[in-house]
Image (cartoon, helix red, strand yellow):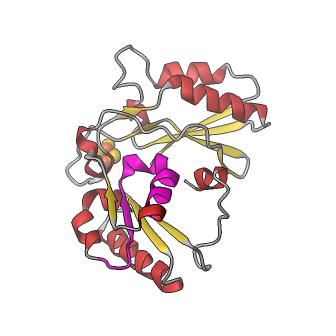
Amino acid sequence: MIQKFKNANYNIVNFTEVADIYIVNTCTVTSISDRKSREILRRAKKINPKSIVVACGCYVQIAKEELEKIKEIDFVLGTNEKAFIVDYVEKYLNSKNYKIELQDVLYNSNYSDFGSVTYTEKTRAVIKIQDGCDRFCTYCIIPYARGKVRSRNPESILKEVHEIANKGLREIVLTGIHIASYGKDFSEKYGLIDLLEELNNIKGIERIRLRFN
Ligand code: SF4
């Protein structure tokens, strides 16, 4: 999301600084993260009462009714809508009406593609390849917040990794909610191993890491 705002010529500042727009990417993995998400949203409005405070992410997806009661929030965005955050925020800036943009991820079968964002951690580029999980483990809320397995199109991933290799980065980290399920939702047989083989052939990429969220 940071890269999307940078591409649209916004200046990114630290969360504790005065800003015109605050984006809080909420978490709902425990009740503590729910509480912290609410606290941070309220804190943002305190830093600049004239700012626009946007709540997005997993807690929003699970508890939009709770968040609707928090007067400090101007705008609520679901997990699938994050890829289009700049468009939604600019639409809000023009209308200034309290707004909710949120799809029911449990019934959504489309991967929401951020495109090439080249998010880096030191010398590594982090590449999101997948979202959602179909396992529904009894103790876990993630499938309800992130929806079913949705895999990013391999062409989109390969394009981003080629761009990364051309920039001189040598290491990539593949990430997602349940990356072992990558490709499960494709009509043709194509899984994580097929993707890894193609990535392994890209000139310049020397190390590929796998990361589960
Ligand atoms: S994200 Fe992990 S713990 Fe949660 S339902 Fe899926 S497999 Fe189970």
Observer-nearest of 112 and 147: 112
Q: How many marks?
A: 0
Q: Is residue 7 left or right of residue 28?
A: right
Q: Residue 180 at x, y = what percent? A: 41, 32
Residue at coordinates 47% horizontally, 47% vertically from top-left?
Answer: 84
The picture quadrant where one finds residue 29 is bottom left
Residue 156 appears anywhere in the view: yes
Q: Which residue is depicted at the point 59% across and 50% down?
A: 4
Measured along the vertical axis of the image, is residue 144 above or below residue 92? Answer: above
Residue furthest to the left: 138
- For image coordinates 23% across by 44% down, the residue present is 136
Choose between 17 and 100: the one closer to the eye: 100
- x 25%, y 75%: residue: 69
Against 20, is 153 above or below? above
Residue 134 on the magenta segment: no
> Is residue 16 placed above or below 82 in the rendered structure?
below
Residue 29 in view in this figure? no
Q: Nearer the viewer, residue 150 or 53?
A: 53
For this orientation, the residue located farthest to the front is: 94
Magenta part of the protein: which range? 70-92
Decide: is 70 above or below 183: below
